[in-house]
Image: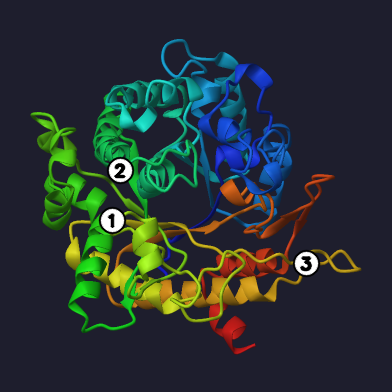
């Protein structure tokens, strides 16, 4: 296998999805607490009040990671836990929790990778407009300053924002994620503000700790058309590609947005871009994080889809009939070859990026313990092995992939799906909170121990 000798093998989680302790230690509500409490928004009214209780059980989870040989743990900081008012006074109880977590990781020989923002915006900031309010840019930069001062002496690698596309479009336009807004103007404003925020967070981190390595994490995909010669689908594909894959990369690398989207948004974008913004967007990052789950499939939208989306270009993708089987429990197609294509494309189109981290890659299957207490999640093993094989093929073609973080370490709160979807390599009984490493955890442990060399034998078996 072609994984470099210093390849970094990790696992990832996010604060709201695992911590619980939603009212402990001075933490205030986030937009996800509010969203969960809104009837009909989250599966069966599930919430993050307890989740995996990682807040109290972090040492147990670190011990599991150490046993598996995990080299790096990507976790996120909870803004409402560190600065409960969104701005202003920091909360020492919250800082102390992450101090304990980081110190325990280092003691176990596991390198911490911190995500500054993984969706749990303090509700008090959303009350003033959240990401649609330009003030958020300076507010999150101040939060980054506090985080760097508190943890930058021990955390070398930082993700600024996780999946700003989801923050923007799922949160402020489609409305299926918190804060549940459905407004195109607010979504476009949020798209601009998240891009600005990445640059300002980076500057804030460096102002405190110049040696910090940081980058943004983007959920990216490769698009496939059911009719590659259809000019309307090609135009739609190009708009989708700019909206999802190019917006934040072109912003930070070129100080510009994709021309087709600038034209499409028109004065809705012009109203939120201020003098000097485009210069501020441009920033060098030490790495790019890519979250990949599947390719996306675009077919000619039905009239009902057009009507439902009020004529905009954001049509449902990966819906029934638009992507081939098999599907995961999330309804997503399984397309490991698409990861190779995406990585090669990123390397070709943005060659200045010389450090790529797969910051999330994983699959939802509902396997539970058998009568012997064993979780034989063989489908997850197949997904893991085939996607790692795709990463290896990209590395063989010269793509500078340096890290891989499996999503997720634990079964957890899966946003609007509540606890109905399980992504973890460690099973969590949400009644007893017992942890059981699955077959996939054992296989991943062997992959790490051999730096990927065991993959060939796993594939053959």
**Residue drawn at (75%, 72%) of the image:** 376
Q: Where does label 2 land, which residue? A: 184
Mark 2, other Cα within 10 Å: few <14 / some 14–19 / many ≥20: some
Decide: is 134 above or below 454. above
Decide: is 253 above or below 1. above
Of residues 348 and 400, the one drawn nearer to the viewer in this rendering: 348
Q: Secondary structure at mark 3?
A: loop
**Residue drawn at (51%, 69%) of the image:** 332
Residue 158 shows up from this direction:
no
Q: Where does label 1 land, which residue? A: 312
Q: Secondary structure at mark 2?
A: helix
- Of the 4 image quadrants, the one containing the C terminus is bottom right
Residue 213 horizontal/vertical position (percent): 33, 41
When asked about the image quadrant of residue 206, the answer is top left
Of mark 3 and mark 1, the one earlier in the sequence is: 1
Residue 229 horizontal/vertical position (percent): 21, 84
* Residue 375: image tag: 3
Q: Secondary structure at mark 1?
A: loop
């Amino acid at each position: 296998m072609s994984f470099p000798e210093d390849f970094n093998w990790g696992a990832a989680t996010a604060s709201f999805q695992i911590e619980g302790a939603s009212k402990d230690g001075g933490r205030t509500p986030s937009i996800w607490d509010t969203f969960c409490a809104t009837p009909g928004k989250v599966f069966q009214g599930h919430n993050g009040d307890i989740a995996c209780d990682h807040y109290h059980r972090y040492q147990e989870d670190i011990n599991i990671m150490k046993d598996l040989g995990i080299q790096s743990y990507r976790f996120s900081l909870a803004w409402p836990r560190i600065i409960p008012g969104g701005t202003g006074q920091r909360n020492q109880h919250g800082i102390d929790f992450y101090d304990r977590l980081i110190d325990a990781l280092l003691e176990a020989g596991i390198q911490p990778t911190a995500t500054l923002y993984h969706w749990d915006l303090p509700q008090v900031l959303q009350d003033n407009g959240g990401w649609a309010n330009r003030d958020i840019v300076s507010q999150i930069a101040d939060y980054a300053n506090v985080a760097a001062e508190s943890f930058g002496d021990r955390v070398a690698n930082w993700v600024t924002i996780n999946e700003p596309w989801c923050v923007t479009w799922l949160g402020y336009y489609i409305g299926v994620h918190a804060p549940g807004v459905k407004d195109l103007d607010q979504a476009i404003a949020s798209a601009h503000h998240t891009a600005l925020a990445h640059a300002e967070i980076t500057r804030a981190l460096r102002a405190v700790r110049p040696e910090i390595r940081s980058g943004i994490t983007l959920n990216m995909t490769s698009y496939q058309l059911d009719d590659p010669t259809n000019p309307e689908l090609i135009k739609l594909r190009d708009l989708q590609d700019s909206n999802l894959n190019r917006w934040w990369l072109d912003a930070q690398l070129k100080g510009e947005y994709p021309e087709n989207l600038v034209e499409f948004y028109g004065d809705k974008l012009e109203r939120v871009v201020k003098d000097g913004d485009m210069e501020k967007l441009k920033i060098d990052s030490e790495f790019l994080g890519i979250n990949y789950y599947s390719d996306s499939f675009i077919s000619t939208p039905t009239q009902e889809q057009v009507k439902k989306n009020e004529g905009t270009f954001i049509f449902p993708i990966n819906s029934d009939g638009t992507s081939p089987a098999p599907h995961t429990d999330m309804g997503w197609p399984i397309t490991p070859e698409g990861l190779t294509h995406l990585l090669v494309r990123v390397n070709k189109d943005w060659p200045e990026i010389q450090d790529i981290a797969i910051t999330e890659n994983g699959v939802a299957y509902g396997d539970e313990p058998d009568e012997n207490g064993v979780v034989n999640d063989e489908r997850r093993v197949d997904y893991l092995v085939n996607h790692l094989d795709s990463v290896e093929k990209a590395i063989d073609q010269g793509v500078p992939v340096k890290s891989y973080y499996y999503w997720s370490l634990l079964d957890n709160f899966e946003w609007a799906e509540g606890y109905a979807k399980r992504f973890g390599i460690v099973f969590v009984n949400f009644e007893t909170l017992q942890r059981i490493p699955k077959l996939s955890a054992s296989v991943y442990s062997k992959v790490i121990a051999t730096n990927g060399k065991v993959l060939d034998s796993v594939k053959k078996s």
